[in-house]
Amino acid sequence: MTEIYRKKAYPFEQIAVAVTFSPRLLAVLAEAFRVVAVFGAKKLMIIHIGKWSEEQEHILEENIKKTNLKDASFEIIHEESKDVVNNILDICKDRLVDLLIIGALRKENIFDYYMGSIARNLSRRAKCSLLMLTEPQEKPKAFERIVVNGIENPKTIPTIETSLYLADHEKANEIFVVREVYLPLIDSGLCTDTTDEESEDIKKELFEDVVSKSDADLEKIIGFKNIVIKKRTIHGKPGYSIRNFAKSYQADLLIINSPDKRMGFLDRVFTHDLEHLLSRIPCNLLIVHSRRN
Amino acid sequence: MATLSHQDIINILIALSIILIGSRLLAELFKKFSLPTVLGEIIFGVLIGPTVFGYYFPETFETVFPFISENPEYAQVQIGMGTITELAIIMLLFVAGLEVQLPVVIRQGKVALTTTLFGMLVPIGVGFLGVLLFPEYLEVNGDTDIVVYGFFIGVILSITALPVIARILMDLKMFKTEMGMVIIASAMLIDLLGWLVFSVLLTMMDASHEGNVLMTIISVVIFMGVLLTIGTKLFDKALPWIQSKFSWPGGVLSISLGLAFLGAAFTESIGIHSILGSFIVGVAIGDSSNLRENTREIIMQFVMNIFAPLFFVSIGLYINFIESFDLGLVLTLLSLAYISKISGATIGARLGGMPKKESLTIGMAMNTHGALEIILGTLALNMGFITKEFFVAIVVMVVVSIITAAPLIRLFPIEIEEK
């Protein structure tokens, strides 16, 4: 087992940001430096993969200066390669990065989505937590309206713990744990031979079972008692329903588990789970990789 | 223009009301014994058909159900009732399509795939072996096309009844488990592949069909491929607009069923049976993320409680189950079904990484047959591909598998660990 898998999902001690020379460079850098300051990390690793020139180095340094952060400690890591995703992932693995920050479009064009853009591919394959900033600001703000996916999964409790750790550092008073319950075929199984009351009872029983299990799991979380955990259970397709919830709640950060398996082309065609979110990211998205699980 | 007479209309309406009210009453009685309504509907058909009512009161039977009679005087009624039954089958297949959710299958990944593959390949292999080893029991004669017949039996043996198994899993508190989801996902994929194979078989069975089989396969694959990818995405894009601008649920209902009929018309026109069109449109619409669950429920309620009884009762109306009961054939088919389906799905689940006990339970659960096998049998019977005896054996297999499913699943008690 490599060293990276022995680490917990938090604290975020090693933070990196992957940058490109896009109009959002300054905003992404500003957000990344803010995150470094919030979590008390020693420095920010700024990763750039691709052609590198003195001019680009100059642009990057100018942008760093523009963030106006005193004592901002950083290290620029650049590699000239066309395999951007694998290089970034290798650097993160070698440097034991806990949190990788990237800028991402809310919605990509159909070709980029199906073929896989750099940001989307990183989110599918990263072995560390990944913060996708959909609307980075040059004057960033703390995350206040945080929604966490509370789906039934062994990774969920480490994700909620990481969310509480994040909320604590962001000085947020509460997080919203949203439990998605999806029971395919439930209506079809009940549609001919149950009364309305029986059907409701069966559905209620299945729902309550999820809720009681989730509540019991949440009780086991130690620490972060200063943060209120609000809870909501919603019925719908995983990924799709929480996307809609985050949008209607006007969340500024949605936190989810890392995918259980490596998502491929078929997962995009027959969209499910993470792919629903990646097809249209509702707000900033943090994918927590609970590595020890 | 030939039209139904005043008396024809009255006859059809009375027959429809007897079918709907009677089957519902019997279904409710069956429910008391925890048996699915579909069994009540089939048995009601047998009771009011030539097996019981028609046998003892032939004249009254012909008066009440004139469309069963071969008397040319009732030709118009036969056409009228035949159209209603045809529509019922198309709508049943549309609903069967709505139940298939490919994202659920993809989510389960390898284990669903191996369970499906072995859950289909073993029954198809056993179907062939059965035809070769027990030709006298399976009614194979000199004119039988062994390949098509073997495939047909294999497909019949391989399909798992989705709604029936979903309900059994709910009752056994296994619905939400990892194992339950594997069963559901595999049954969904088997449905899809089963109908794909069957639509090709129908073309091969149809002696009048002049097109070649390869063209049929290519057409089916293109039709499915386009509809399940581009079709689903287009419908998904249009759905929020339809749901917000049109009356609800009327707007979605009309458009969904309209598309199902259009799909059915298209496949019929290119030489594939109409049922495949409505089934694939159902899958495409069912896969749409924006389809509200209560819309799906309303469509299902409408079809399963009105059109399903019409079809399932009509099965018993046309056949004398006692005259057409062949014990040897029934036992052969039952043996083949239980051996092939249980072993195939068990091996598949095991290869997919499920533990031994869970794999066996998956095998038992996957051997639950239902409505689709009966529809498949009806189509084959109407085309003269199988005999009434074979059709009765299929119905018996379905009934027995439903009754034995829950006890068989309970044979291997496992610790339920929810997903």
Image: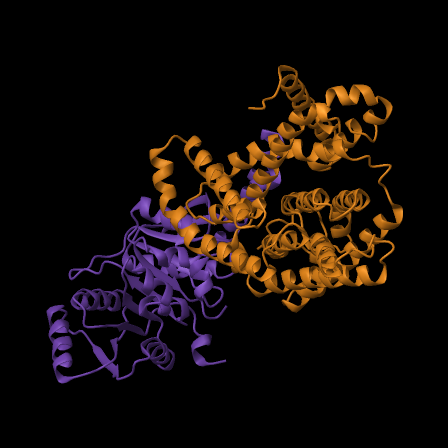
Chain colours: A purple, B orange
When asked about the image quadrant of residue B73, the answer is: top right
> For the view shown, which residue lies furthest in the top direction?
B6
Q: In this view of the protein, which residue sits in the foreground, B371 or A238?
A: B371
B374 sits to left or right of A258: right
When asked about the image quadrant of residue B46, the answer is: top right
Location of the C terminus of chain B (image quadrant) = bottom right
Residue sitting at 68 percent across and 27 percent down? B75
Q: Position of residue B78 (x, y in %)?
A: 67, 28
Location of the N terminus of chain B (image quadrant) = top right
Residue sitting at 35 percent across and 77 percent down? A92
**Looking at the image, residue B232 lies above or below residue A117:** above
Q: In this view of the protein, which residue sits in the foreground, A184 or A1?
A: A184
A49 sits to left or right of B216: left
A146 sits to left or right of A204: left
Q: Is residue B205 visible?
A: yes
Q: Position of residue B38 (x, y in %)?
A: 69, 36
Q: In this view of the protein, which residue sits in the foreground, A216 or B137?
A: B137
Q: In this view of the protein, which residue sits in the foreground, B409 or B136?
A: B136
Q: Position of residue A224 (x, y in %)?
A: 38, 56
Q: Is residue A220 visible?
A: no
When asked about the image quadrant of residue B345, the answer is: bottom right
